[in-house]
Image: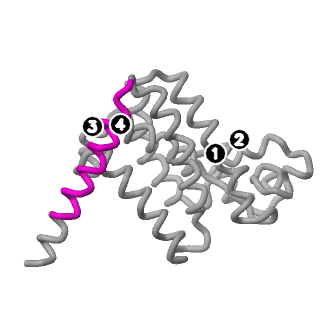
């Protein structure tokens, strides 16, 4: 939270420009920016949203695989998402936030613990994961959504999380993926039934 407050207060300072991730900063030799940008957020709401998702999905996956693996997946997912997103956003776009790293954890939860019920979202986490992935995919496909949101980064983070989820699912990833898809089918049937009334 302190990093976000600092970044908002000094938004256009030379110090902050050296901490934001962009292809231009990487080309300047600012090799630390894929890490520092994970702790900088564009607004208080961006930060609060990420804290909620990190708490729900991060704590779930940490209980299953341990802190070291969870932290490694978080950082690797975030760093690679920033770098791979350059293809879609170009070298001059500034990218900040932990959303893509959290999407790495979201994919892992979908494949490791999909039936974990979230009292915050009032649904199983496998369903939350697949809904948020599809929302980002549709947003990119149809070209809708806010320009300031890194939907491609979210998708890339999710895709990076899939191999981690497969590797650490103790051989249950196929079953857990089918559970998540089944939960989505039930959800869509219920939503359709409600709107048909």
Of 166 and 94, the residue lying toward us: 166
Q: Quick one: label 2 or label 3, which is nearer the N terminus?
A: 2
Question: Foreground mark, 4 or 2?
Answer: 4
Residue hosting label 3: 116
Residue hosting label 4: 174
Question: Marks 4/2: CA distance?
Answer: 32 Å
Q: Secondary structure at mark 4?
A: helix
Q: Secondary structure at mark 3?
A: loop
Q: Is residue 151 left or right of residue 59?
A: right
Most common secondary structure along the magenta stretch:
helix
Q: Residue at x 52, y 40 (%)?
A: 161
Residue 178 coordinates in the image, percent (x, y)? 29, 44
Question: Foreground mark, 2 or 1?
Answer: 2
In the rendered structure, are the residues bearing label 4 and label 2 in contact, judged by CB atoms less than 8 Å apart? no
Q: Residue at x 47, y 53 (%)?
A: 48
Question: Marks 1/4: CA distance?
Answer: 33 Å
């Amino acid at each position: 939270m302190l990093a976000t407050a600092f970044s908002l207060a000094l938004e256009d300072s030379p110090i902050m420009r050296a901490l934001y991730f962009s292809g231009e900063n990487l080309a300047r030799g600012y090799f630390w920016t894929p890490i520092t940008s994970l702790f900088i957020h564009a607004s208080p709401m961006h930060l609060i949203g990420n804290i909620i998702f990190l708490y729900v999905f991060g704590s779930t996956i940490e209980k299953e695989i341990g802190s070291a693996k969870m932290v490694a997946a978080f950082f690797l997912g975030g760093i690679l998402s920033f770098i791979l997103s350059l293809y879609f956003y170009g070298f001059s776009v500034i990218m900040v936030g932990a959303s893509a790293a959290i999407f790495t954890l979201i994919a892992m939860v979908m494949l490791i613990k999909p039936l974990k019920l979230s009292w915050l979202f009032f649904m199983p986490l496998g369903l939350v994961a697949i809904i948020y992935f599809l929302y980002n995919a549709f947003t990119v496909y149809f070209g809708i959504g806010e320009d300031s949101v890194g939907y491609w980064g979210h998708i890339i983070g999710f895709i990076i999380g899939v191999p981690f989820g497969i590797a650490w699912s103790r051989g249950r990833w196929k079953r857990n993926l089918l559970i998540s898809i089944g939960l989505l089918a039930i959800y869509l049937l219920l939503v359709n039934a409600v709107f048909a009334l």
